[in-house]
Image (cartoon, rainbow, N blue to C red):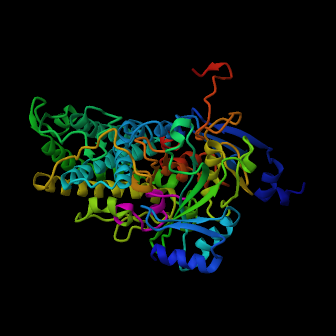
Amino acid sequence: MATAELQDPRVIEFDVRTDEMLVNMGPQHPSTHGVLRLLLRTDGEVIHECTPHIGYLHRCAEKIGENLTGPQWIPYTDRMDYLAGMNMNLGMALAFEKLVGMEVPEKAMTLRVIIAELGRIASHLVGMGAYGLDLGSFSPFLYAFREREIILDLFEEACGARLTYSYLTIGGATHDLPGMIPIPPGLAALTGRSPNEKLLWTDALRLFLNWLEDRIKEYHTLLTRNSIFIKRTAGIGVMPAEMAISYGCTGPVLRGSGVDHDLRRDGDPIYTRMYAGYNWDVCVAPFAGVKGIPPEVILGDNWCRFFVRMLEVVQAIRLVRQGLDRYPTVQGEYRVPFKMSTKLPVNECYLETECPRGQMGFYLVGDGQAEPLRARAKSSCFCNLSVTGPLCQGVLIADIPSIVGSLDVVMGEIDR
Amino acid sequence: MTFQDIHQQLLDRFGAQVISGANAEAIDPWVEVAPEAIAEVAAYLKDHVTFAFDALNDLSGVDYFETDAKLAGKFPYEPHVEVVYHLYSYTHKHWLTVKVKLPRWKGGVEGQLPEVSTVSHIWAIADWHEREAYDLVGIRFLGHPNLVRILCTDDWVGHPLRKDYEFPLEYHGIRGK
């Protein structure tokens, strides 16, 4: 071979070309967010084809739902998206209320807004922390879990559970918000209060929100504007809006691609009336009015999806605060009774709600019995994950955790 | 657009043979489409500017069947299988539910899956939703690029969301009951 040819790097690359190789990533790989298996066809470091294989966590939730009444099925919805159990409960409860034509009092709605938005904060904190972890940054994960711990403590005071709440139920919630509680130990330590202090649940929540709001710029320093993080996320996994819509992507993934759509504002009236009168913004890429966006960022890339979640935490804090302000004066009870034996009408309904990971839909068909004929749970992550195949074509292996992590999938919800 | 407008426009375009039914009083009003025409109607609904249903929110299969002979008399539906499409338009912000009714078994022969053409070339997400409907409800989507099971393992027998599905007593040496 002539020397002149060797100086051209492409010739050498051609010379050492490797064969295609099949690589299984998962199902026990730590950066696949649960039991997800990605079958990769690679040429060296470059992915030619990426096929997700799911179903490792399939627990027949829909089949079980056909044999249970609504209130009995609520605990199973907790176990779908186990990082946002409250939002799952809410979606399912609203679908049943829509089917039987039930209206909940204003107090129950306000309680639901507080709890659901708090659930959104907790879920996005894990999403943020785990995403940092995927990309090799450990500390944000620990900070995120420190914050989430306090939310879980508050949830525990409200309903007794820390992960599978079954708190928001058909007709409202199982209990009213608690009164005086011992201060959560984490909150006492972080705010310098006495660990023996007792205070109102709502005051503890306010204290936490004030403290959390100041921490957010620290997360931005740690991740959002961290140059390694930007290099790993900006310009990678770019998804145009048409593609996101065609693949059924919803939630932060859709808004990261620049589609201005949020069911809390654009959804079914039974859901949007919960949020009537609240002041908040839908966070959509390319983030008009936000300063300091890195120049490498392209609309619809991993960074945008991540940043939507970060901004949504701030909006959720706003919503919780407004809910707390309303709560003492709202009318009605925290729930209206719903009997377990209530017969469902011969009718059907479909309802989607804005969960932290996207639009979770419940499709119920009643046949005159107390158990629905069909209880379908349309998973948002299921749709969001389906885009991995096309998104991962032609990227490097190291970019796969970055892309899958930016979709923020929870396998419990995908496999149901 | 209201449901009545959509329904009327579909009737004008395709006729009552294809748009074989509708229910405007249902909680989510729906139109019923003849199985052989669903791909054509779906493409029309997506591409026509007045509809612009660019998103398929959900596709689910439903098995309308009562296994208990004593309760079958009171069962309010005819035994059949349905494919339900929940459409949404980001442009016009309107919803539509489209249904396709199929026999429980093709030609009435038990074990022969009912068939309907795929819409996965119209909405990309239908690919996975149809695989799930095939896997769990047992509906064959003609023209689907890769109709294999998605949640159950490849060698699973039967379609679990069928009402007359019998849970296997044994799977690869694992006792089921």
Residue B35 falls in image quadrant: bottom right
- Residue A108 placement (x, y as % from top left): 22, 50
Say which of A384 and A326 sits in front.
A326
- B174 up-or-down from B68: above or below: above
Residue B51 can be seen in this image:
no
**Residue drawn at x 75%, y 57% as measured from the top left:** B143
Q: Is residue A110 left or right of residue A121?
A: left
- Residue A381 placement (x, y as % from top left): 50, 49
**Residue drawn at x 48%, y 70% as measured from the top left:** B90
Residue B111 falls in image quadrant: top right
User: Quadrant where the N terminus of chain A lies?
Assistant: bottom right
Say which of A68 and A323 sits in front.
A68
Q: Is residue A82 left or right of residue A146?
A: right
Q: Is residue A404 left or right of residue B111?
A: left
Range of residues picked out in magenta:
A248-265
Q: How many marks?
A: 0
- A61 up-or-down from A291: above or below: above
Residue A91 can be seen in this image:
yes
Query: Does the magenta-highlighted stretch encompass residue B50?
Result: no
Q: Is residue A1 left or right of residue B71?
A: right
Say which of B122 and B4 sits in front.
B4
**Residue drawn at x 59%, y 46% as measured from the top left:** A398
- Residue A360 placement (x, y as % from top left): 44, 52
- Residue A366 placement (x, y as % from top left): 45, 49
**Residue drawn at x 33%, y 59% as measured from the top left:** A271
Residue A55 falls in image quadrant: top right
Considering every residue shown, the one lying at the far right of the view is A1
